[in-house]
Image (cartoon, rainbow, N blue to C red):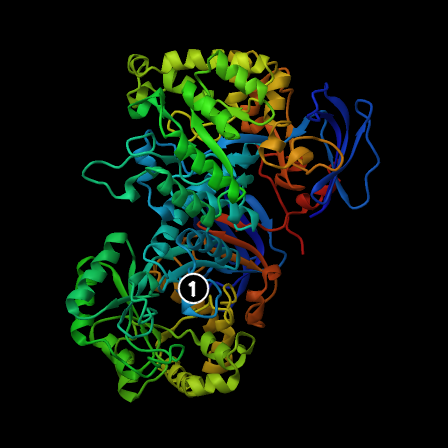
Amino acid sequence: MSDVLFTNVRIFDGGGEAPFTGDVLVQGNRISRVVKTAYGQRSTPVLGAMTIDGAGAFLMPGMVEAHTHFSWNDQPSLDAIQRMPPEEHILWCAEVAKRYLDMGWTSCVGAAAAKPRLDVVIRNAINDGTIVGPRYLAAGQEITVPGGLGDTTQPHLPQPEFAFGAVVSGPHEMRRCVRMQAKYGVDTVKINLSGESITGMPSDMSQFTEEEIRVCVQEAKAWGKRVASHARSTWSIKECVRQGIEVIYHASFCDEEALDMLEAHKFEHFVAPGLAWLINTCFNASQYGLTREVTQKMGYHRELEAAIESMKALRKRGVRILPGGDYGFAWTPHGTNARDLEYFVKHVGMSTMEALLSATAWGGPMMKMGKQLGYIREGCLADILLVDGDPLADITILQDKSRILAVMKDGEFHRAPPVGQARPVRTGAPATVNRWAA
Amino acid sequence: MSDTLFTNVRILDGSGAHPYSGSVLVQGNRIRQVGRSTAPISPAGATVIDGAGATLMPGMCEAHTHFSWNDAATLGAIQAMPLEEHVLWCAKVAGRYLQAGFTSCLGAACAKPRLDVVTRNAVNSGQIPGPRYLAASQEITVLGGLGDETLPHLPFPEFSFGVNVSGAEDMRKAVRLFLKYGVDSIKLNLSGDNFTPQSPAETTWMTDAEVAAAAEEVKMRGKRIIVHARSAASVKQALRHGIRLIYHASFTDTETLDMLEAVRDEVFVAPGIAILYAMLNEAEAFGITRDMAIGMGYQIEWDAALESLSKMHKRGIRILPGGDYGFAFTPHCQNARDLEFFVKYLGFTPMEAIRSATLYGGQIMMRPNELGAVREGYLADLLLVDGDPLANLSILREPKRLLAVMKDGQFAKAPDIASQRAWGRAA
């Protein structure tokens, strides 16, 4: 692994300041030097470092996806995800992990896996170099109640292997379930506290007793694990605050009290709304039978409005809102996750700067790595993107793989920037002659 | 996909013919033109690779591959790997074989029911890189035989390395299940192995009724049976049942050799002698001293195998490289070492050794007229080698000497290109 000097780049350092022209030196897996230079000025090369002239490209921290499901396999239903055999499923996860890194997500927070060990195995395989993928926090299966979101067993097929989630009833079963997930080595215990309209249980309904939730949180904390919750309903959002559940996914139906509670504890929680799911289910899923009529009847349009209002209010109150969520369905395919940033700008009222910060500055603590991640600053881990264009002017360019010129994770290029001489040959051009010489 | 023209290469075509200088044009996934002179072929839009005199030869074939053996020292330790990790292991190993110059591998058994099938499918769909692959079943064995790793107090089938059957109907059911999963080959253990002292190499324990049931099912579905057969009795049993791919064949008598020679145009023998050599000479670090290996019977088998295989080679029976790499003492991707063993111990010429990995490889992969040689119309599985493998076979084991690996017309390992070396100076 050689050191890398990026010169002549526009640096967005993750601190909220306007980008500046400068150089970034990466030594080992860390950023060792960040300096401002004049436009076009070239610094002297550093001994032993490969120099990359960015030609004014935008250099920013790698992005953090706050609600990732590698094992969702771009299918239209939970059942179709569950049906994939474990051997194929793990290869799918490995393929998807790489796709995230390709698209500039250098960290991802697992938000539930479709089979017990998928997330854990993928995290371990990334860490030991068996496969390539982002930094990853592994989740277990979603914990749910009989008949709740994630219980895909059928009356005549009651075997637990048919269930998408881990189905428990009562504090005793909850404790056993959390212990089993801790044994497998998850980082995060995921619990479904509210419904999800598409499964037949409306999003504004809630599930689990306070006691079951308490046991879940208590047991997870005893093992040093984090709890994350699917919480769309008002009660479930409040329950997250009351019980100290750090990660709140969705939070669609916030009432005034819920907003007050979240504001009062805003540095103890992360909110990842996963707006992509609501927006695309409402408007872009008709080819899967989810016409506007159907989704209206399900209540998704009403939920989308409520969720946007909730996020606007939470933004004003300074609650940390992060991108990511529920990519991996047929109408929200993996790799398109940067749409979330566009949605934040378009619907929630964030500036492009705020949207970028939501994917970077909040990412470090979301990954439990504090300020080591999410910044282009001396001493920080070298997770770096080189982008063709200015995301602050047009946030949508982050959705375009060809605009993400380079992806570096932990000081190593996952995707190296294209080199002048090696640009692809246009069709009709004369033959390229690449000579191998002894 | 762009076309590729190799110029200025020494072509070792795999057929046994002497190498010659020339050029090879690859279009799509096939070898379009082979030029036998230094006069260049017109590139016509192809990427030109100037070989500067390097050897161009067919990609090699490994005739007895276990992707799912995980470089552990015991069958139990292979079996103990959980399913998810095991799949990722296989995927990684498949990629490594391709990088090591094996563009084809014939699966010889996997450690869990679907590992081989899933790996093959993932390679074919382009999800992971890997060689052409024929997927095998688990080893089918009998209670107490090689591959039965259950313990008396843990009799669960999940603990077993192989699938244990008893009786023809059990066998039929096991075979049908694997055929359902989509294997290309059904693996039967007809003899024991000195690796498992409860069922040593010279024991033969499957009944004819059991073997016949398997053979019938496999024939019905158009698949192939492959067998672990170290003892003379097991080799003969295999031949009697029409089985044409025999692994090991260490112990033979004149009758066995006559039977093999009688079907020499159909039968393949892949002895996998590396494991015998390693157990005797290189397993001490893993707790098996030479004395222990001799005690297990490995010296007797080694001597017998060299004699049997040398005789087979003289009788014109096709002997192929590969076998039982994937243990701690025979780690994956050293497989080309078999070619050196063939020359050193079995009386092969280096040219015969190359042919056994190339031309015979196409035949054992069941693609005799399009795989395993540098010939016009053949599939473009090619290696560019720095040096002359005929002068020194061991260079085939050195990653640095394998300048390029092409499978199906695409580079799995692209040759180092001058312009890329200037990468660091791009600024």
- Which quadrant, please, contains the C terminus of chain A? bottom right
Q: Nearer the viewer, residue A180 or B390?
A: A180
Where is residue B24 shown, x and y percent of the image? 51, 53
User: Would you place residue B107 above or below residue A172 in this image?
Assistant: below
Q: Secondary structure at mark 1?
A: helix
Residue A337 placement, left or right of A74? right
Where is residue A143 shown, x and y percent of the image? 38, 36
Chain letter of disc 1 in the image = B
Residue for point 26% across, 57% down:
B178
User: Would you place residue B289 above or below residue B161 in this image?
Assistant: below
Residue B200 visible in this rendered orientation of the protein: yes
Residue B300 placement, left or right of A265? left
- Residue to which mark 1 is pinned: B78
Amino acid under disc 1: Ile
Mark 1 crowd level (few <14, some 14–19, many ≥20, 10 Å Cα): many
Which residue is outermost to the right? A44
Q: Nearer the viewer, residue B115 or B315?
A: B115
User: Residue B64's quadrant in the figure?
Assistant: bottom left
Residue for point 52% across, 24% down:
A271
Residue for point 48% across, 57% down:
B93
Where is residue B28 shown, x and y percent of the image? 44, 44
User: Residue A194's quadrant in the figure?
Assistant: top left
